Amino acid sequence: MTTLMRWVRDGLFVILLTLIAPIAAQAAPYAAMVMDMRSGEVLYSKNADTPLHPASLTKMMTLYITFQAIEHGEFSLDSIVTVTKHAASQPPSRLGLRPGQKIAVRYLIRAAAIKSANDAAAALGDYIGGSEEGFAARMNRTARQLGMKSTHFVNANGLTRKGHLSSAHDMTIMGRHLFFDYPQYYNIFSRRSADAKVRTVYSTNRKFLAAYKGADGIKTGYTSASGFNLTASAQRGNKRIIATVFGGTSTAQRNAKMADLLDLGFKRAPNNAPTNRPRIPQYIEPAQSPMLMANLAPKKSPRPDIRPTAPTADSDAISMALAAAVQADQVDESTDIPEDVAEGAQDATADTQDVVVADVGTLGIGAEITASPRPQRNPREIQVADATKALPAEVTKATPLAQAQAHDAAVAAGKASADGSEEPSDVQLASYEPGASDGPKFVQSTQPQPETMELAEAHTLDLDKNGKAPSSFVQSTDPQPETAQMAAAPEKRKSEIILAALTPPAPAPEQKPRVVARVSSSGGRNWGVSLGLFGSRFAAERHMLTTALMESDTLGEALRKVATRKTGYEANFVGMTQDMAQLACARLESRAMDCKVVGP
């Protein structure tokens, strides 16, 4: 290559560099905002309201909407997302998702928040919004509710698109809402690494988190159009500062500028400031959601139409009703039940399982019978309401035992069931209250009971020639001799026998409270859990304190210990049993927090 050619080449390079440099500088303008996290007071502002390219700071809104959807039951951390072709085709940074791949929401959150994976953020957007456009509409609606006046989103990951803009002020507001509205998830922005199922992901902000004292989040961003962006938060003593910088020229320059902004904030912020939480935006249920198809399934079948009332019944109608109850025993269990009948059975009350005969006269019956669903197999009882009308007036004034005998005699005299066989002759007393206006009630059993037969033989009430009970007879509520005799030597009863006591049962003795003492022992408490590595001892201790308050049920008795490692400071809870450690980790992982069980 001749000297002339080298001069031409170098000259062209200088000319090209001269043309490109202003364009690059213009493509990444500088903007900054510093705010007191506690009160929301602006401590420093530079071009803070200028609409610029936010890059991956956009993912803060994607994650905010994800947390909001989980909170309101649209899906859960363990819901499975099917990756769309659109999400899988996103350029780096990437988790490496494939079209059709199935992955839990919790892993997409970790990848989007820690690694800033574009495919993971797009997968969340497609899953929640149904499409990129649908999710962008929800992002913009939420941005307006948060007061982000210079923001308009087009996609879920922040890749440069026409009209996709935000400002340093709006992204500072976004970070503050994440901190206050979803503190249970905020710790994910301080992690150095996490398991995202496909692979272990490492934080894009780990250098700044390790270098700046008190830093604990939250999100980085970079495209050629935006430059190096960062929203960061740090706490020192009672002060907590949040700041945003746009247009950094490199990672190192951006981090240095952020350190200067945070130092400025700590210098200007008062030691004690009121905590003014931002207003949580009103939740608007989306028209379409991942759970839409499940919600379309009917929770309850329509109630069937009311069945027509049966015509006024006579004695033959009542015989047919009683016969239906008896014939139910012969129904094959394999018979198909119509759908409307099955639904009606669920809405029916327990009294529809028995045949109820109302307002029974002596022989001529002028009552009205309401048709009931098909009787259950092998009905045990037939309830007879207002039974005093079926017996002579003289008998209703006698004792329950005399009434039972008189009823047996009346049945034996000529009343038969619908199938031609005589009805059971025994009537078993269910309850009796002296002086009740509606008279005694009877429950008819299909088999004679030994107790009833014994009482009938031994204690028959003598009636006069007119069939009336002696006027001197008085029903007593005190325990009767036969009751005492039966209580002294009870016989083993069948499971279907019901014998009511004539006296109220004695109250059950009050149980004394049992005092259970926890055994205090250190035996087996050589297990623990590790919460991961942190850049400073202070950060590890603070994270353990926050975690202990969050999971006091499982970590309340554990000891907090910071172990110094070559790569950082490891936060550990020790002095636990194996079961306690495993339970603690399971609960922490359900909150999308890193946790590892450490054994002896």
Image (cartoon, rainbow, N blue to C red):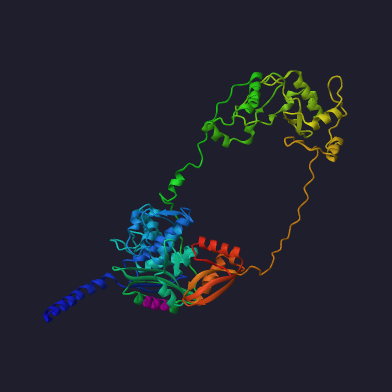
In the image, taking residue 225 as reference, residue 351 lies left or right, namely right
Nearer the observer, 54 or 343? 343
Residue 55 position, x and y percent, is 34, 66
> Residue 475 falls in which quadrant of the image?
top right
In the image, residue 456 above or below residue 206: above
Residue 266 position, x and y percent, is 44, 77
| Magenta stretch, residue numbers | 255-264
Residue 42 seen from this side: no
Q: Is residue 257 magenta?
A: yes
In the image, taking residue 458 as reference, residue 345 lies left or right, namely left
In the image, residue 268 above or below residue 391: below
Q: Is residue 478 magenta?
A: no
Nearer the observer, 588 or 225? 588
Q: Looking at the rendering, in which quadrant would you find the N terminus?
A: bottom left
Q: Residue at x 48, y 41 (%)?
A: 298
Nearer the observer, 583 or 268? 583
Magenta residues: mostly which secondary structure? helix
> Residue 439 falls in which quadrant of the image?
top right
Residue 61 seen from this side: yes
Q: Looking at the rendering, in which quadrant would you find the C terminus?
A: bottom right
In the image, residue 514 above or below residue 233: above
Residue 488 position, x and y percent, is 85, 40
Count of numbered marks: 0
Residue 325 position, x and y percent, is 64, 27
> Residue 250 falls in which quadrant of the image?
bottom left
